[in-house]
């Protein structure tokens, strides 16, 4: 079995949006053999056949190595992220980035590692053993009961960056990339307005070209 290791979100990815045209290029994630992944935990899955991301990636299989957290802890964090920020269109591969980023913080800080370990243990205990496999209503009830705790705030805060600042999410949501330095979106495929007359040139300031 060949799998796609999810790329580090801190580095530019090959499948980023083309900021000149707004076109989303293929997600060219590198392939690696699963037995090369030697971390503490491993998350893996597959993209739904026929989905947008499946059409952009070289393979529907993906895998993510965890250096500090266990597979069970990573799965619990993925499931918690989906409770906090539910998006049916986002595949598990995107929520796995949340586990990856939290794992990186745990690997670099003992206090964070303990916080995440204790927090995920509580999630699983509250769910009767496996939070990730609990019914949606029960998962939501458990997460709500932890609102305001340091664990809850840590995971929720990381969700904002991990789930939305990556090329897979951009592709799913149709975000074409920044346009402020390219005269705005109006000149990048959004200038096809037919039911209003074209505004005069003096109505808008000239683009700042540096």
Image (tube, grey):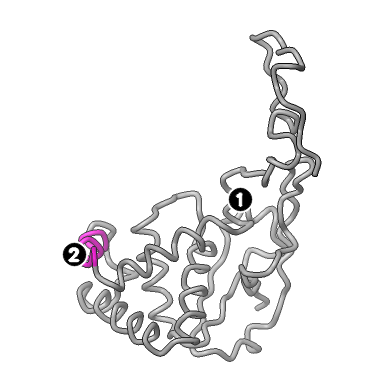
Q: What kind of element bears circle 1?
A: helix
Q: What kind of element bears circle 2?
A: helix
Locate residue 150, reporting x and y percent.
29, 72
Q: Is residue 3 magenta?
A: no
Q: Which residue is mark 1?
A: 170
In the rendered structure, which segment of residues is drawn in magenta?
A: 138-148
Quarter assignment of residue 127: bottom left
Quarter assignment of residue 7: bottom right
Looking at the rendering, in which quadrant would you find the N terminus?
Answer: bottom right
Quarter assignment of residue 34: bottom right
Instruction: Classify 10 Å Cα crowding around label 2: few (below 14), some (14-19), many (20 and above).
Output: few
Query: Would you place residue 187 above or below residue 169 in this image?
Result: above
Looking at the rendering, in which quadrant would you find the C terminus?
Answer: top right
Query: Would you place residue 146 above or below residue 208 in this image?
Result: below
Q: Which residue is mark 2?
A: 145
Instruction: Classify 10 Å Cα crowding around label 1: few (below 14), some (14-19), many (20 and above).
Output: some
Instruction: Indicate left or right for 206 with 41 as reference.
Output: right
Instruction: Indicate left or right for 80 with 98 as reference.
Output: left
Locate residue 152, reporting x and y percent.
30, 68
- Could you tell me which residue is drawn at 43 percent across and 77 percent down? 74
| Inter-mark Cα distance, 1 to 2 | 32 Å
């Amino acid at each position: 079995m060949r799998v796609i290791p999810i790329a580090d979100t801190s580095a530019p990815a090959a499948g980023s949006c083309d900021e000149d045209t707004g076109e989303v290029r293929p997600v060219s994630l590198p392939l690696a053999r699963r037995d090369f992944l030697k971390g503490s935990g491993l998350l893996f899955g597959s993209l739904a056949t026929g989905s947008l991301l499946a059409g952009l990636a070289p393979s529907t299989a993906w895998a993510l190595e965890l250096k500090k957290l266990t597979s069970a802890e990573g799965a619990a964090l993925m499931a918690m992220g989906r409770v906090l920020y539910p998006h049916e269109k986002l595949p598990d591969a995107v929520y796995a980035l949340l586990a990856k980023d939290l794992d990186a913080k745990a690997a670099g800080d003992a206090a964070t590692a303990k916080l995440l370990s204790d927090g995920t243990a509580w999630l699983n205990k509250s769910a009767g053993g496996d939070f990730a496999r609990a019914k949606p209503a029960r998962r939501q009830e458990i997460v709500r009961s932890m609102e305001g705790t340091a664990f809850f705030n840590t995971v929720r805060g990381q969700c904002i960056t991990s789930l939305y600042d990556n090329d897979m999410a951009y592709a799913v949501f149709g975000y074409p990339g920044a346009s402020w330095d390219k005269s705005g979106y109006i000149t990048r495929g959004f200038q096809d307005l037919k039911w209003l007359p074209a505004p005069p040139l003096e109505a808008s300031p000239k683009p700042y070209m540096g």
